[in-house]
Image (tube, rainbow, N blue to C red):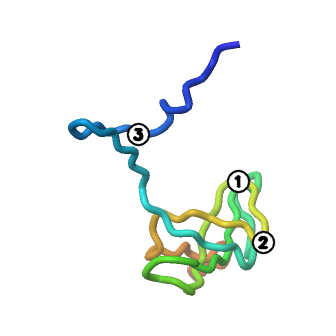
Amino acid sequence: MAKTNIKSSKKVVSKGDSNEIRFSYSFPAEVKEIISRAGSRGGLTQVMALIMDGRDKDKAIRRNVKGPVRKGDILMLLDTEIEAQRLGKRKRSKR
C-alpha cells in the first residue's frame, strides 16, 4: 500500500524564507429548506440557504447543490451575490 502525501493536496506558495498556505475564502450557509430536485436522475437539488457570515449575513438565497444534501447541512459558498433561477415553472409561448 502506497503512502499518500497530505501536504501535496494543499497549495504551498513560497515567499522568501517562509512557506505560506493559501485557501480561497468562502462563506458558510445553512440549508433551511429543500425546494426541488432536477436533472435526468435527480442529481441536482435546489435549496434555500441562509448565509451565516460575511457581507450578506442573514440573507436567504436559492442555490443549486450537486450531490446529497439534507436540511441543516452547511454549504461553503464562494460567492453570495448570484441566486439560482427557479426550476420547473416555465412559461410556454402561445402558438
The amino acid pointed to by label 2 is Lys
Measured as percent of width and height from the top left, residue 63 is found at 59, 70
Is 26 located above or below residue 13 in the figure?
below
Estimate the spatial distance between the alpha carbons at disc 1 and disc 3, rounded to whole Å.
Answer: 25 Å
Q: Which residue is mark 1?
A: 67
Residue 71 - label = 2
User: Which residue does the image show at 74% across and 61% down from the upper left?
Assistant: 69
Q: Residues within 10 Å of mark 3 (few under 14, many from 20)?
A: few
User: Which residue does the image show at 55% across and 72% down from the upper left?
Assistant: 84
User: Which residue does the image show at 65% across and 56% down from the upper left?
Assistant: 66
Q: Which residue is mark 3?
A: 11
Measured as percent of width and height from the top left, residue 41 is found at 76, 52
Q: Residues within 10 Å of mark 2 (few under 14, many from 20)?
A: few
Give SS at disc 3: loop
Is 56 located above or below residue 63 in the figure?
below
Q: Residues within 10 Å of mark 1 (few under 14, many from 20)?
A: few
Can you tell which quarter of the image residue 3 is in? top right
| Placement of the C terminus among the 4 image quadrants | bottom right
Measured as percent of width and height from the top left, residue 71 is found at 78, 71
Give SS at disc 1: loop
Q: Nearer the viewer, residue 40 or 16?
A: 16
Q: In the shown orientation, is residue 92 left or right of residue 23? A: right
Estimate the spatial distance between the alpha carbons at disc 1 and disc 2, rounded to whole Å.
Answer: 13 Å
Front position among marks 1 and 3: 3
Disc 1 and disc 3 in contact, CB within 8 angstroms: no
The amino acid pointed to by label 3 is Lys
